[in-house]
Image (cartoon, rainbow, N blue to C red):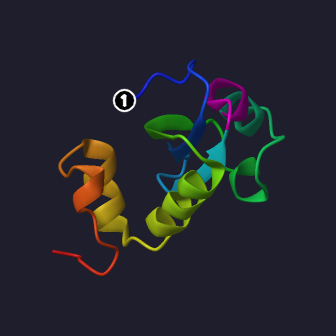
Amino acid sequence: MTTTRSPGHYTYVLRCSDGSFYTGYTTDVERRVREHDEGDGAKYTRGRTPVELVHVERFESKSAAMSREYEIKQFSRSRKERLVEGADAPESLDPRDDG
């Protein structure tokens, strides 16, 4: 997992208390996870705390990170599970591939 202290733009995946996944974008992963846990994050995570950070990717630009966020959100649950387990390199993931 990429360090979240270096400057940059991040796409992250949380595992919520109900087992579902939430994907987001931020420039400060620790702060954002804390916000989700405190109920100040996305509406989706408010009733699903505590959350666990399970995947982070760092990008040089906001647009690249947000594009990746959108891409991951299109993945099936099984693809998200493989992503957070590290079974596939991020570059090889294709949202249309459930295999």
Q: Position of residue 95 (x, y in %)?
A: 34, 74
Q: Is residue 37 left or right of residue 82?
A: right
The residue nearer to you, when weighing 17 against 93, is 93
The residue nearer to you, when weighing 96 against 34, is 96
Q: Tag 1: residue type?
A: Met
At mark 1, the secondary structure is loop
Q: Work out whether 86 lies above or below 70.
A: above
Total label count?
A: 1
The residue nearer to you, when weighing 53 against 16, is 53
Residue drawn 64% across the image and 24% down it: 30
Residue drawn 61% across the image and 25% down it: 7
Q: Quadrant of residue 54?
A: top left
Residue 97 sits inside the magenta stretch: no
Residue drawn 69% across the image and 51% down it: 45
Residue occupying the far front of the picture: 60
Residue occupying the far top of the picture: 5
Q: Work out whether 65 lies above or below 86.
A: below
Q: Position of residue 74 (x, y in %)?
A: 46, 74
Q: Position of residue 84 (x, y in %)?
A: 33, 46
Q: Position of residue 8 (x, y in %)?
A: 60, 33
Residue drawn 56% across the image and 41% down it: 10
Quadrant containing the C terminus in the rendered view: bottom left
Q: Specify the segment rendered in magenta.
A: 27-32
Residue located beneath label 1 in the image: 1
Q: Work out whether 47 lies above or below 7.
A: below
Residue occupying the far bottom of the picture: 96
The residue nearer to you, when weighing 61 against 27, is 61
Q: Main secondary structure of the magenta part?
A: helix
